Amino acid sequence: MPKVKLLKIAHGRSGDKGNGSNVGIIARHPDIYPFLQETLTAERVKEHMKHVCKGEVERYELPNIGALNFILNESLGGGGTVSLKLDAQGKTHASQVLRMDVEVPEKLLELV
């Protein structure tokens, strides 16, 4: 299977929720969503974002829109009003997750 950046098969949005960032990853095609469900675990996102996320990662499934939502707890240095981080609202966190390398079946790559 070819290894590509997650960005090839998904897009995302992110923002802040107190001291945690909220990262939504959305499949670029409905047939890609089951692959994301299987591949993009909370543990895998935690490993990829360990440089930012000091707490637990929670995953929520949104099958009606083909998306996964991740809460990266303790990732904003206390939150937007108290943090000294350059990105205290987590606006770049979706971009960071989308740069994760994933092995994707060719038949799914043909959909995008």
Image: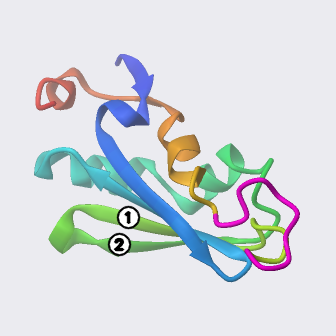
Instruction: Mark yes or no: residue 71 visible.
Output: no
Q: Give the percent coordinates (x, y) of residue 110.
A: 13, 24
Q: Please say whether residue 88 is one of the residues in the magenta stretch.
A: yes
Q: Amino acid at mark 2?
A: Glu
Name above or below for residue 102 compared with residue 51.
above
Q: Amino acid at mark 1?
A: Leu
Q: Give the percent coordinates (x, y) of residue 32.
A: 21, 45
Mark number displayed over residue 110: none
Name which residue lies at 78% across and 79% down. Answer: 81
Q: Residue furthest bottom?
A: 18
Q: Please say whether residue 7 is one of the residues in the magenta stretch.
A: no
Q: Give the Cα separation between the discs numbered 1 and 2.
A: 5 Å
The residue stretch that appears in magenta: 80-89
Name above or below for residue 89 compared with residue 34.
below
For marks 1 and 2 on the same chain, the one whose residue lies earlier in the sequence: 2
**Callout 1: SS:** strand
Q: Give the percent coordinates (x, y) of residue 10.
A: 31, 43
Q: Residue furthest top?
A: 2
Q: Nearer the viewer, residue 45 or 18?
A: 18
Name which residue lies at 36% across and 16% down. Answer: 2
**Callout 2: SS:** strand
Provide the residue designation for mark 2.
Answer: 61
Task: Find out whether the residues at labels 1 and 2 contact each other: C-beta distance under 8 Å.
Answer: yes
Picture quarter containing residue 43?
A: bottom right
Q: Would residue 108 appear left or right of 45 to someone viewing this image? A: left
Q: Would residue 7 appear left or right of 52 to someone viewing this image? A: left
Crowd tier of the residue under label 2, counting other residues whose Cα lies within 10 Å: few below 14, some 14–19, many 20 or above: some
Mark number displayed over residue 68: 1
Q: Would residue 44 appear left or right of 26 to someone viewing this image? A: right
